[in-house]
Image (tube, rainbow, N blue to C red):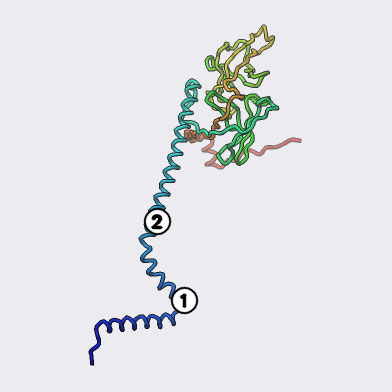
Amino acid sequence: MKPPDSTDLAGSRLFFIFLLISVVLLFISGSIKLRLLAYPKAVFLAPLNISLRFFNNISTLRQENSRLKGLLARLQIENATLKEIIQRQGGELNLSEFRLEKAQIVGRDQMTFGSYLLLDKGAAQGLKVNMPVITEQGIVGKVIQVSTLQALVETMRAKDSKIAGMDQRSRVTGVVSVNRGNRLKLNYVTSDADIQIGDTIISSGLGGVFPKGLLIGQVIKTQDHSQANGLFKEILLKPFVDIYQIEEVYIITGAAVKSEPPKPERVKTDWEKTKERLRIEPPLEIKIR
């Protein structure tokens, strides 16, 4: 009899192994089968998953880099705008004190001749009531109403607008309000005040809304005491900002917080120390009816 070939033995062993695996698979649960089948898949796909995560991380980093570049560009534009505003104001403002939010004008109230403007920025961008609104040329007005994504601005042409103003040359102060036509007037300036045609009127910083040094307008007409027949001069201004020509504005949304020096502790008098030591109460107030 011919002895079995080694090839036949190997084939028999392989057949027996597959048969044993088949029998085992008949008696194990489906979840275990899935795990056994998934293991080789996980082993072979692991390098691919690592590669995919690597490229996803690169994509995320690129997006973050793009976002930071956009933020940097915005800050550079904002800084350049601030520098231009400072130069136009004649050095009255401190560049480090303010933050600006740029906005587009999306609506105008034609019935009130430019008294109100609607902006495409609102509370979501940090806008609040009474925030100053400006351009590179000077003051536009202030925010009077805010929604989530829009804001209403009262311009200097509104009849209720009042801005504390000051002559940049002589430092004479007054209150700026609207006048007929595209003109403003400086009120409550005494007849002997030093105000000349061509002088620049800026915000004085009083009133708590507009910071000191923002451009308002130029003096184009004055009437002295004898002509005006009163105690105050009549002073007309041409505003530096033409409300009808602007398309975008800047809102001053923040200012640097200035810390106040600590107040010195009050030194008690000898009498106060004596009262505390002896616990002397103040005399009762006796009312006589």
Q: Position of residue 32 (x, y in %)?
A: 43, 75
Q: Residue 70's quadrant in the figure?
A: top left
- Front one among 273 and 90: 90
Q: Residue 155's quadrant in the figure?
A: top right
| Rendered view: 30 above or below 91 | below
For marks 2 and 1, the one nearer the N-term is 1
- The residue beneath circle 1 is 30
Locate the C terminus and report the quarter of the image it occupies.
top right
| Rendered view: 188 above or below 206 | above
In 3D space, how far apart are the residues under numbered discs 2 and 1 (Cα atoms)?
Answer: 30 Å
- Front one among 288 and 2: 2
Residue 218 image label: none
- Amino acid type of the residue tagged 2 in the rendering: Leu
- The residue beneath circle 2 is 52
Instruction: Name the element at disc 1.
Output: helix
Q: Is 192 placed left or right of 47 in the picture?
A: right
Q: Position of residue 104 (x, y in %)?
A: 57, 33
Q: Could one spot residue 241 in this view of the protein? A: yes
Q: Is 277 placed left or right of 23 in the picture?
A: right
Q: Residue 284's quadrant in the figure?
A: top right
Q: Position of residue 28 (x, y in %)?
A: 44, 80
Q: Could one spot residue 263 in this view of the protein? A: no
- Front one among 264 and 173: 173
Instruction: Name the element at disc 2.
Output: helix
Q: Position of residue 198 (x, y in %)?
A: 56, 12
Alpha-carbon neighbours of circle 1 within 10 Å: few (<14), some, or many (≥20)? few
Locate the N terminus and report the quarter of the image it occupies.
bottom left
